[in-house]
Amino acid sequence: MRTIGHFIDGVETTGNSAEFQDVFNPATGEVQARVALATEADLNAAVASAAAAQPKWAATNPQRRARVFFNFVALINRDMQELAELLSAEHGKTVEDSKGDILRGLEVAEFVAGAPHLLKGEFTDGAGPGIDMYSMRQAVGIGAGITPFNFPAMIPLWMLSPAIAAGNAFILKPSERDPSVPVKLAQLAIEAGLPKGILNVVHGGKSVVDGILHHAQIGAVSFVGSTPIARYVYATAAAEGKRVQAFGGAKNHMIIMPDADMDKAADALMGAGFGSAGERCMAVSVAVPVGDETADRIIAALKPRIDALKVGPATDKASEMGPVITKASMDRIAALVESGIAQGATLTVDGRGFSLQGYENGYFVGPTLFDNVTAEMDIYKEEIFGPVLSVVRSRTYEDALKLTMDNPYGNGTAIFTRDGDAARDFAARVNVGMVGINVPVPVPLAYHSFGGWKASAFGDLNQHGTDAIKFWTKTKTVTARWPSGIKDGAEFQMPTMK
Ligand code: NAD
């Protein structure tokens, strides 16, 4: 059986690992590989390699660092098909969707190829007599990224690209459920010209995450995953004095106004609710039609679309939606669906007991639609992270807005309408980090930044865009007086500009 090793000091290795975890094919339920779980010694080896390589990398001029990213992007494009198939085999999403996962990460690698411009500091000429003041952005040193299973290419690339382009060395701890693509990305980075040690990958769960959070040589930690662990990572890393950003779970609402184009809104809900089997942090899991007539129309438009949705393995090109990631996840979703029925929601499309010939042991969940969901039900309160769409009927726009705002999560939201006043009002007032207007999954592009509000994100700087450059660098401000002897004698009062 294939063993997936760590990537330390430029080579794939199982290092000191004595424990391994099975990596499943979610479409078949079969074990297809095993991944080495890092020991403390493995993490220390990765950090030692990073520490040895980082000063020279930071001293390499930013144009040269950027060139590595030009090569890196070209190599990822070269291997796109192979990477996408590998990603699908471990995650379960369709190959086209895997390409989207890789491409949205690649776009951040393209963005940071502008590192020389992004890293420019500020300069004030003549801040005082003979005094110039300037600030520069310097690498934190060693950064670490801890990433979730649902975007095994995109989120690692969102973190490692700005961190490395800014002159840091980076330790990636990807999800142990689909660890192959992150290792391949590290190999491609080396092929692109990245010095060994600048990008290391270690696998594992809580113990290696704890090792990262408490490691004295790691200066900054970026985390993406579920909210309870995001909170834990944020608090633990902050208590260690590290810079930390931690992005958590989501419950994204899409408001459908009575004037919306129902066919377009239904198409949007299909992709946003069932794409990637609902396992996206920006998936729409709650549809909020305004008025009963709107609710009836959107449900009527959704039902035939859900019935026609092609569920199958990624190896079948016709598949539009694959399995969920694990058996535990499948069982959890099934239990939540039962709770929805028991708590009084109307099961409009029943996805229970879904089975596919030849894939009976796969982790497939049939697309499910609930109507008459209320805010008290578990299917509303929990992040289901599966292909289950809940319709919460709302009497008015204000009620729909309030529902969205009262939800503890604040990652993404959308409004579908032809009314510019409503759209503008929604964007201005809603307490959610990413807002779509007639766009169901408003993931910002690489040169803007990505991040939620409320329980969806902890920390003040977002992913990618200029925020990422700020996160992975420290500001140093220099005050210089030339000629140095312009004024003699000691000064005891605080220097001011009076
Ligand atoms: P997860 O929280 O289970 O795991 C995330 C990472 O934390 C993994 O690398 C995992 O190995 C590690 N981990 C697991 N248990 C840990 C523990 N007890 N202590 C320390 N580390 C631990 O998340 P997941 O199931 O891989 O991913 C799905 C979740 O991620 C969903 O909640 C989803 O909304 C969220 N997500 C959020 C965003 C965002 O940008 N806000 C993006 C993608 C996914």
Image: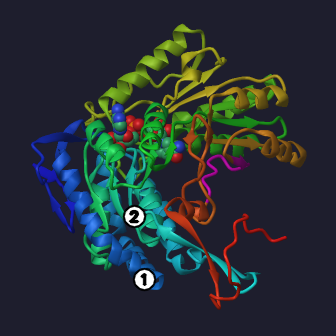
View extreme (right): residue:
421
Q: Which mark is residue 141?
A: 2
Q: Does 37 sit left or right of 227 as displayed?
A: left
- Name the residue: 37% across, 70% down: 76
Specify whether residue 43 is painted magenta. Answer: no
Going by the numbered disc 2, the residue's amino acid type is Gly
Q: Residues within 10 Å of mark 1 (few under 14, many from 20)?
A: some
Which image quadrant is residue 273 in? Answer: top right
Which one is in front, 406 or 340? 406
Residue at horizontal 60%, vertical 15%? 346
Q: Mark 1 — residue?
A: 67
Above-or-below relation of 408 to 492 = above
Quadrant position of ligand 1 = top left
Would residue 383 be found to the left or right of residue 95 on screen? Answer: right
Secondary structure type for disc 2? loop
Residue 127 image offset from top left, x and y in percent: 75, 79
